[in-house]
Image: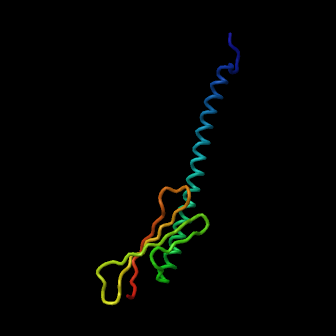
Amino acid sequence: MRQGGFSLLEILVALAILAAVAGIGLEMMGGAVGATSRAADYRQAVNLADDRLTTLAARNAPTGSEGEEGRFRWRLTTTPLEPSAGSVVAHQLTIEVSWPGQSWPVSLTTVRLRQQ
């Protein structure tokens, strides 16, 4: 005859299920923390690219200008666009920001008019 309560086998099975669910939950939380960190890095790189692009475009910086800010590296590329209208030439300015651990850079592009 069986009395009330759980057998040792039932308790072990319940603990195994609990451990599996807890492991999955921890893995999901770890993935969320990693995604949040990557999103913060990306946001910081976009802000840096926007700031550098605005500053360098205002100064008519030459192509190949580059620099570092913290762990982020940036590089400006300037390309004249055809056709030009008299003494004004359109230039495409592209800035790329990269940082360690990221497989692709953040890239922003704008077009500005410059005097020849």
Q: Is residue 55 left or right of residue 70?
A: left
x, y percent for residue 89: 35, 84
The quarter of the picture where the N terminus appears is top right
Above or below 96: residue 100:
above
Q: Residue furthest bottom?
A: 87
The quarter of the picture where the C terminus appears is bottom left
Residue at the image point whose x is 60% and y is 47% from the top = 30
Above or below 25: residue 13:
above
Residue at the image point whose x is 36% and y is 81% from the top = 90
Above or below 103: residue 63:
below
Q: How is the image coloured?
A: rainbow
Q: Is residue 16 left or right of residue 49?
A: right
Relative depth, front residue between 86 and 28: 86
x, y percent for residue 2: 68, 13
Q: Residue furthest left?
A: 83
Task: Name the quadrant containing residue 112.
Answer: bottom left
Q: Residue furthest top?
A: 1
The number of callouts visible is: 0
Residue at the image point whose x is 61% and y is 37% from the top = 23
Relative depth, front residue between 36 and 107: 107
Q: Is residue 35 left or right of residue 104?
A: right
Q: Is residue 85 left or right of residue 56?
A: left
x, y percent for residue 28: 57, 44
x, y percent for residue 40: 57, 61
Residue at the image point whose x is 49% and y is 83% from the top = 59
Relative depth, front residue between 41 and 79: 79
